[in-house]
Amino acid sequence: MVHRWFWGVAGIGIVILGALLALYGVRQARSQTPLTITGPNILPNNDFAIVDPQNPELPAGWSRGATGVQLGGFTFQPTPGCDRPPYAGCAMQLLGIGNYLRSPQIEVRPGAEYRVAFRALSDRAQNGQAAPTRVRVLFHWQDAEGIEFQVTRGAWQAVPAQTWSTIAAAARAPDDAVRLAISIHPASDDRIYIDDLSLGQVGVRVNPWPHGKRAALALSFDYETAMGGLIHSRSVDDPNAAADPLARGLRMREGADRALELFAPHGIRATFYANGYNFLYGNTERRRFMGDPVYAWANTQPGHDWRSDRWTTQPWFSADPYATEAEAPAWYFGSQVQRLIAAGQDLQSHTFAHFHGGFVTPDDWRADIAAWNEAAAQHGVAPATSLAFPWSSSAGMSDASWRVLAEAGIRSVTRTAWTEGTRRSWIADRQHWSLRRVPGHATITVIADSYLTPQRLTAVQRDLQQALLNEGAIDIWAHTEEITSPAQIAAWRTVIEAALPDFWIAPVPQIVQYAQDVRQVTVSVEAERPRYRVRIHNRSSRDLRGVTLTLPFAPHRVEVDGQPLVSTGTRLTLDLPRGASRLVVLDGAPEARTDSRWEA
């Protein structure tokens, strides 16, 4: 289903090019750029072919201001199925002067120019007379925190009655722009139909994800011994809170092994968010970690919600059996951690103590991070750069606590607040599934997570589709103890098989780092004709593999640094060493022509 709009097969660039040249034409751009060639469509579901399963009146990923915006039995070009619901791939009806149609989001670069064009007609007559109207396009720019900080308003353009016309608009991304959505607004209550829509970037586009993928997917787990959230379980946010902690600890071990079996055939690397006791081979020395604190906040009061007041008086690690891993395998996972490392899996912090992030002090965070890093170092694991909050407990974090995380090198977080009661503390984007910068803490990125169980499989599939429709990044997760049932294993297989074609699957830290590094890849067009010459420069401090470019046309021939290279339609994939600059030369640029539709 998600493949309807995804460009990725040989020859597609020629089709896109022909459609764009017929629809857009080319013009001399204004002021600071000499570029004239607009690239192929980069807006997901631009043809309205994927219908929203929750609201079949709308294409998936699109939104509206009110009823009156819906798929209709009308089309610019003959399309099968436009004579009956659900009207997939048909024109959009726009009705209502206060209404609008808004697109999915795409990644953008400051300074780049983006052009949108579509067909429109007014389907209304008054007293036997045709009733023309007008529409305009708005460009909505978001920054790294997801704030819509600027709107570029296009000019009002005429829409004739019962005759298709071309509407076109262009805008240059402002400084700080990271993402873009467009919206279309009418100037009257006349019924308007919109079809044949495309959004392109002028010049060469650096895609947000590598290897030709359209979105990013992390698979991750909360991976805990009995000393994690199992013995310290709360009465909320834990479906197994009442279960025996020792039995759960053994299932956590079993589930981690099952996960490795699931991932091995596909070479998948996941992120295992571990607690401190996961790294131990035992504790016969009776070590006391973090001063073995007592947490008065771990009580039964509303909003705290522990199952008893036990931990308000007992030290947090007092249940330690002080045994070896062989004697107490539910408590210590040292040998299994070694198997995960050998399999190339990523180990990150679920905190050492599995405490509540919103209740502890900055000093508690410092002690916890130091203890986790020390325990991980015994296995050769680097200090944590990613954190999954226990119990999604980011709500209540102080500025000082966030600063501790940043100073300790935490660069990404997940399992953040999501319940309605914590709405004021939401920082993850669970609508478009874009990476977000934590407000006030520019070095920390939050990736939104979706919890996978057999009962939530359909919801997770919807979340995956939304991430794909918005060029986003999503973290699908569970507790390792849950990957022990046939139903749960089947759910994970379903997600993996569905994601493999279109998603780049990588650990959370790798996704976040790549997203930052690829934005430091710059494009400089040296000439458009007779040969299109463009220099690609990796200004990041890391080697980047599989950097994917959307070319402005489907070339007859491609050279990279003087050597011929195979491209697929309008897509070209390159490896870029750190600091490297590569010259790409394309043959077959279309001839320039003037088209006043592109004049602002």
Image (tube, grey):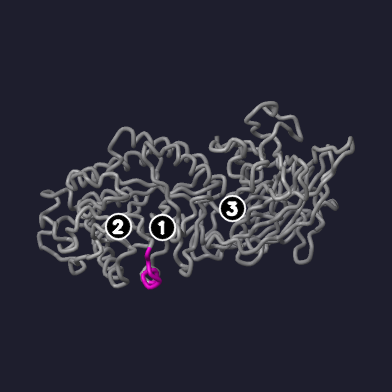
Q: Residue at x 30, y 50 (%)?
A: 236
Provide residue 109's location: percent of width, then percent of height.
Answer: 62, 60
| Residue 198 occupies quadrant | top right
**Residue bearing mark 1:** 422
Q: CA distance from mark 3 to mark 1?
A: 34 Å
Boundaries of the magenta span: 396-403
Mark identifier at residue 302: 2
Three-letter code, disc 2: Pro
574 left or right of 291 in image: right
Q: Quadrant of the N terminus?
A: top right
Three-letter code, disc 1: Thr
Q: Nearer the viewer, residue 259 or 363?
A: 363
Q: Earlier in the sequence, mark 2 or mark 1?
A: 2
Q: Earlier in the sequence, mark 3 or mark 1?
A: 3
| Residue 528 occupies quadrant | bottom right
**Residue bearing mark 3:** 207
Q: CA distance from mark 2 to mark 1?
A: 14 Å
Label 3: element kind: loop
Relative to 311, residue 495 above or below = above
Label 2: element kind: loop
Three-letter code, disc 3: Asn
Q: Residue at x 27, y 60 (%)?
A: 355
Whether pointer 3 and pointer 2 mark residues with C-beta atoms closer than 8 Å, the reply is no
Provide residue 600's location: percent of width, then percent of height.
Answer: 80, 58
Q: Nearer the viewer, residue 126 or 63?
A: 126
Provide residue 313's location: percent of width, then percent of height.
Answer: 15, 64
Q: Is residue 566 visible?
A: no
